[in-house]
Amino acid sequence: MSATFSSPQNLSPRQLGWVLLAAGLLNTMLWLQSLDIYLDTRWQWRLQSVLPAAAFTPSRQWASWWGRAVAVVDPEPPTGQGPAPLLQPLQALPVGEFWPTLAQQKALPGPQRMLFAGDSMMQGVAPLVMRELAQAHPDWQLTDLSQQSTGLTARRYFDWPRTIAKAIETQQLTWVVIFLGPNDPRDMFLPDKRVSFATADWLQHYAARVDEILAHAHKHQVCVLWLGLPAMREDRLQRGVQVLNHVFHDRASAFGTDYLATEPLIGVASLPFQKYQRDETGPSVSLRTEDGTHFTPAGLRKITQAVVAHIEKAVQP
Amino acid sequence: MAGMSFVSPEFALLCLLFFPLYWALALYPHAQRTLLMLSGYALYASWDWLFAPLLLVYSLAVGAMGMWLARQPHRRLPACVALTLSIACLVYFKYAEFLRTSLLALFDVLGWHPLLPEWDVVAPVGISFLTFQAITYLVMVSRQPSSLRPLPQVLLFLCFWPTLFAGPILRAERFFAQLDAGAPGQPRETLVALYSIVLGAAQKLVLATWLADTWVDPVFKSPEQYGGLSVLAAMVAYTLQIMLDFGGYTLIVTGLALLLGFELPVNFRQPYLARNLQDFWMRWHVSLSSFIRDYIYIPMGGNRLGFARTQANVLFGMVLSGVWHGPNWTFVVWGLLHGLGVVSVNLYKRAAGPALPAWLAHTMTLLFVALAWVFFRAPSLEAAWRMWQGVFFNDRAFWQVPPGPMWALLALVMGFLALSRHAAALQADLVARLQAWPVWRLGVLLSLSIGGVVALGPSGVPGFIYYRF
């Protein structure tokens, strides 16, 4: 037996390097498809763009063996539902302006069954809204499915249209409240092409994903309240907010659903980001956490009050 | 804001390139240390590119203060100035907004409404750990000027990435002693290192994530939606989650440091086997508790100034330990609770109370620690109170269906406590067995272990609890 394969008291750097390399490469090969989805979601970079399709075969077989079949590409919208033309073309709003709240729905009378969907922003808002509503309406059923790092762009990582559609059917929902977006200002990878963020093509495909949710809700007579995004600290997100709010507002107008503008509460996206807001009477209050995306308890309180007030108004006969 | 985590795939893949290169440079210590330093800055910049220049400026300032301190004939006052400056940096980044809102609330009660400046700064990740490590260097130099280090070594110490983000708090003496001892750039105790990394990843990615997703997060978010048993189970689950999360993290960085050729201080000694709170603090986050003991409690007089003053020092040290974790009153209350607990133990001992049976002392300690953790996890005092209310004053049926399989939680808790007693022996035994294995078999085992962790772990990369400190 050669020295390399002798019983080691302590592996030499060379042996250790080979062991790590072998274990690393083997696992990379077996989990390549999952790694691709992860890198796509986390760093917006796809292995599929640099590796041949055959490289993914072992990982697909391995994943299905584990019962973890993973989507190779973003799922397509249902048959017949192509890219959605927007009612209004994307335009930069004048400084200080924002898309206003739309309150177009009236809920059916009786106990409501409500779903909260979205990303880490909704993870902050949902528990507070649920607490307020549960106190006022103990007979309502409230479910929070919000999950961090999710959105509508990287659909193969987390498929909100399908998740919401399934919840609508299994829980016989009457309301869906949605708050997401900071993970979405990025290019979209479709089966045949990469679509750059904020182009006309991107807007149509993103709107189609919004439409998929709204159309399913409409079909089942479910009210939808879509929360618009407030200003963000990061420039990329700040620009993204204006694009996404345009789509959310446009599609809510088209489907007759509700849109709640958080910009007047937290910060207008066409103005410079501000962490603090001064009340008329009291001192200035910080509404945003350090990252400039999420909310402090004071910020969450403002959004919660607005959401609860909006829903309460919509359920009044 | 999220940087490169030690349990992320991209970090693992970069390690495959980094470590062989690092070891290959063992014959060229300067180049090797430069690589280590650059990798520290690159990792720090992955969170926010601005953090890297901030770290550099801070490290240069600490290095300069060290040089200034070493030149002073009388170093007591200069040392105070240097420590105040380094702590001021922590306060500026981490506590200014907390102080502002607390003062405004206080002034509001007094009917006074002054305008305090708004504070919009982003605290660099791990700044609490960084500050404490910087303090160990400044104190070392003030006590022994001959221990002054060249600036590049100070920079290396303060950007040493295994401890940069969430500890363990590595003292300057310990780091430089290893640097001086020879060539630390070769991997040490490689089997222990690999065992630690795999075990730590399994604890964090599989067990702690399951506890968080299934039990802790849903219940802490909306305790009023669950029965008393579920709320109690969530408290138990968090008690285990934080141990597996932070303990797992410590194992991972300990293993990584060994691969770099450095040994980190022990941070956990099976804390949930403690039989009183003093014992607990000699086992939990040891690098922090020993820092507070050596750099705060003892300089304040320790136990040398009478019983009453000793208890005041204990209380101060524990509250400070709480505040160190974050700018939130929940951490203040958590520290205060532990301080009062330790003082109570001291009073009981002074009153010569009868020794409790071991099982009772163990249970009482664990119960106290678990109940106090609620303040550590809850986002506000109100939320913590709602959790406690959820156990004792709950409108829902106590036995209401819990959010996860209770048997699995119980099995995990019992299994963890049982294994804790034998963890050191099990590790020694396993490593001894592995030493007898041929290299190819080790490779297969490592591959299977990593594959198992990936298969059972979450789809994304979860954050570490202690990253926010």
Image: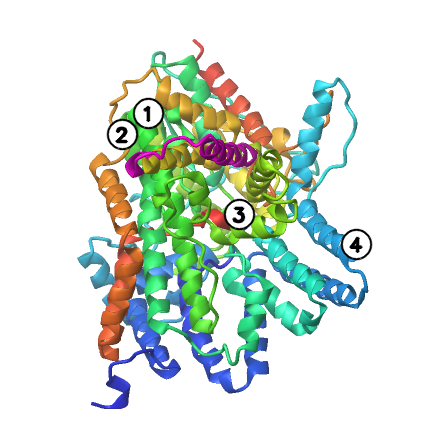
- What secondary structure characterizes most of the magenta part? helix
Q: Earlier in the sequence, mark 2 or mark 3?
A: 2
Mark 1–mark 4 Cα distance, whole angstroms, equals 56 Å
Q: Residue B440's spot in the image, x, y percent?
A: 24, 78
Of A279 and B450, which appears nearest the observer? B450
- Give neighbour class at mark 2: few <14, some 14-19, many 20+ (Cα, 10 Å): some
Which residue does the numbered mark 1 point to in the structure image? B226
Three-letter amino acid code at the position of disc 1: Tyr
Q: Given contact means CB atoms under 8 Å apart, are the residues at marks 4 and 2 in contact?
A: no
Q: Residue B315's spot in the image, x, y percent?
A: 57, 36
Q: Earlier in the sequence, mark 4 or mark 2?
A: 4
In this view, B397 is above or below A211? above
Of B186 and A296, which appears nearest the observer? B186
Which residue does the numbered mark 4 point to in the structure image? B77
Which residue does the numbered mark 2 point to in the structure image? B402
The stretch in magenta equals B331-360
- Using the rendered view, name the quadrant where residue A305 is placed: top right
